[in-house]
Image (spheres, helix red, strand yellow):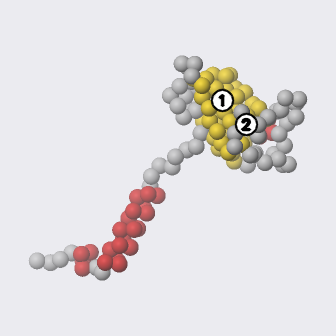
Amino acid sequence: MRIPSVVRCPLATRMVLAACVLTAAAACRAEVRRPIVVDGNTLTLENQTADEWRGVEIWLNDHYRVTKPVMPPGERFVVPLDAFVAGFGQRFNSKRQIVQGIEVTATNARGEPVRLVHGHGRRR
């Protein structure tokens, strides 16, 4: 009877092969998408739920805001950071300011609150 060559390998070689297989398997897993992504001068919000969101407010650094009346399930909303406006009309300046926190509030179709936070979010 002939023993397969893998079995005759030293233990260290088998452990390295097992580690390679596990690493490759982990790399093939689907990456989890975040619902709030800031990339350069753009914010992307994705409704990853099965519910429609209504009265969506996106707050940036506690006092800059953008609103959207409705976000259906699966929709991605891409907005430039310079579109965020404070109460007295000041615009967020992405060249001079940094994103410290984002909070998204809305209600779903059943009237339940929706709240997502990225970074520090708003102070309440």
Residue 15 in which image quadrant? bottom left
Q: Which residue is mark 1?
A: 105
Q: Residue at x 35, y 78 (%)?
A: 12
Q: Residue farthest to the front?
A: 124
Q: Position of residue 23 (x, y in %)?
A: 43, 63
Q: Nearer the viewer, mark 1 or mark 2?
A: 2
Q: Residue at x 85, y 36 (%)?
A: 91
Label 2 sits on what residue type? Answer: Arg
Q: Residue farthest to the top?
A: 110
Query: Crowding at label 1, few (<14), some or many (≥20) Cα neighbours within 10 Å?
Result: some
Residue 57 in which image quadrant? top right
Label 1 sits on what residue type? Answer: Thr
Q: Position of residue 29 (x, y in %)?
A: 45, 52
SS for dot 2: loop
Residue 24 in the image: above or below residue 3: above
Left or right: 22, with 95 as reference point: left
Q: Which residue is mark 2?
A: 123
Q: Residue at x 83, y 32 (%)?
A: 86
Left or right: 110, with 10 as reference point: right
Q: Residue farthest to the left?
A: 1
Q: Position of residue 42 (x, y in %)?
A: 72, 43
Query: Crowding at label 2, few (<14), some or many (≥20) Cα neighbours within 10 Å?
Result: few
Q: Position of residue 25 (x, y in %)?
A: 40, 58
Q: Is residue 63 visible to the viewer in this orientation of the structure?
A: yes
SS for dot 1: strand
| Along the line of sight, the residue nearer the viewer: 50 or 124 | 124
Choose the circle earlier in sequence order: 1 or 2.
1
Q: Which mark is residue 80?
A: none
Q: Is residue 70 visible to the viewer in this orientation of the structure?
A: no
Count of all numbered marks drawn on residues in the image = 2
Look at the image and tell me in which quarter the C terminus lies.
Answer: top right
